[in-house]
């Protein structure tokens, strides 16, 4: 993860070196060499993805590509805050490493689960979760697309919700290979611990507005951005509303910065008329630069 951009650009190398120093071990080696089992641990995955994303961002900034708005899906909200100038890279890397550990430790192994419900709208999934709540905690975790919502909670309740969803017309319900049930009330212990850490960090006012996961609305004050990150731990990611908010304000281009192109796929479902670019490595950077993209990220 990130090796190509690291080798090609000094600014990207500097990002990885800063991240290594911030968390006190060679995260860059883990990103480039693995082992995969270690990289898949949430406490490592989160800082690795953030660092790889910011490395690409720095190269885009060198090319004169800057956003009018920023948004990030779950963990990506930290990258968005670094991009906006609110949060330092050092603080962001340290925060997400702790965030990952806290989330992993909040729920005993085997107690939680997540699943993607395909083919039902958000209101129908809300009703499914309410119907399954007799079996335990279950709630929407990610409103990813008009017909795709991820649910999260206790294993038995998630299984019952999956059964009910299929009975009510879902096309598929896919169990997700996750290490913890994110964005639901089971994460309350993680939220409390993270709040204490974020409270000690500096959040400057933002140079460009952030569309928050938790409210799907723009913020520019650092203290509000911090509060949004705290509330995000137990609340769903309102991605559909966030993207529609941006479209309503005239955004005509989206750029996904960092590993993968999942968000580009979601944009195609939410706002198919708006072009979305996935920028993970050198090829993506060159394609975006050649498109002369004064891009919104």
Image (cartoon, grey):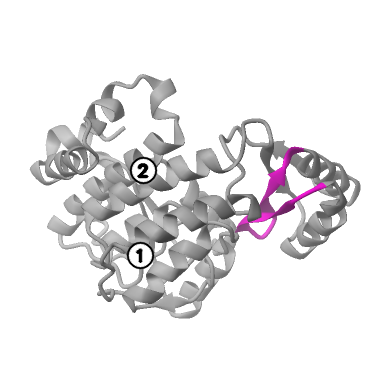
Tell me if residue 11 comes above or below residue 294 in the rendering: above
Residue drawn at 23 percent across, 61 percent down: 292
Q: Check if mark 1's residue and mark 2's residue have beta carbons within 8 Å.
A: no
- Residue 296: in sight, yes or no? yes
Q: Position of residue 51 (x, y in %)?
A: 28, 44
Which marked residue is nearer to the observer: mark 1 or mark 2? 1
Residue ranking furthest to the right: 167
Q: Does residue 247 appear to the left or right of 70 in the view shown?
A: right
- Residue 252: in sight, yes or no? no
Residue drawn at 23 percent across, 26 percent down: 29
**On the image, numbered disc 2 is attached to which residue?**
97
Residue drawn at 25 percent across, 72 percent down: 204
Q: Secondary structure at mark 2?
A: helix
**On the image, numbered disc 1 is attached to which residue?**
199
Query: Residues in magenta?
Result: 136-155
Count numbered badges in the picture. 2
Tell me if residue 174 comes above or below residue 32 in the rendering: below
Q: Position of residue 65 (x, y in %)?
A: 21, 62
Residue drawn at 40 percent across, 54 percent down: 76
Q: Position of residue 138 (x, y in %)?
A: 74, 51
What is the quadrant of the N terminus in the image?
A: top left
Viewer-nearest residue: 170 or 76: 76
Q: Does residue 242 appear to the left or right of 116 in the view shown?
A: left
Q: CA distance from mark 1 to mark 2?
A: 16 Å
Q: Secondary structure at mark 1?
A: helix
Residue ranking furthest to the left: 10
């Amino acid at each position: 993860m990130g090796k190509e951009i690291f080798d090609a650009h000094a600014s990207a190398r500097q990002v990885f070196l800063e991240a290594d120093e911030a968390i006190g071990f060679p995260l860059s080696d883990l990103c480039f060499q693995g082992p995969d089992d270690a990289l898949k641990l949430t406490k490592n995955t989160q800082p690795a993805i953030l660092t790889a994303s910011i490395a690409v961002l720095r190269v885009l900034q060198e090319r004169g590509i800057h956003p009018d708005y920023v948004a990030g899906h779950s963990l990506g909200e930290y990258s968005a805050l670094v991009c906006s100038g609110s949060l330092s890279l050092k603080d962001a890397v340290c925060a997400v490493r702790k965030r990952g550990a806290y989330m992993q430790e909040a729920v005993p192994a085997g107690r939680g689960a997540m699943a993607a419900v395909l083919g039902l709208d958000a209101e129908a999934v809300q009703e499914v979760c309410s119907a399954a709540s007799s079996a335990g905690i279950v709630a929407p975790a990610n409103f990813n697309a008009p017909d795709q919502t991820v649910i999260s909670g206790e294993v038995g309740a998630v299984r019952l919700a999956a059964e009910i969803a299929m009975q009510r017309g879902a096309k598929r319900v896919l169990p997700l290979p996750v290490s913890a049930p994110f964005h639901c009330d089971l994460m309350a212990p993680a939220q409390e611990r993270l709040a204490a850490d974020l409270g000690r960090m500096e959040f400057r006012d933002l140079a460009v507005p952030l569309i928050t996961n938790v409210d799907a609305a723009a913020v520019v004050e650092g203290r509000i951005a911090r509060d949004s990150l705290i509330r995000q731990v137990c609340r769903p990611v309102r991605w559909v509303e966030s993207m529609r908010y941006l479209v309503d304000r005239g955004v005509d281009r989206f750029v996904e910065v960092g590993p993968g192109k999942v968000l580009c796929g979601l944009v195609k479902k939410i706002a198919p008329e708006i072009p979305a670019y996935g920028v993970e490595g050198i090829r993506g950077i060159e394609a975006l630069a050649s498109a002369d993209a004064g891009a919104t990220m």
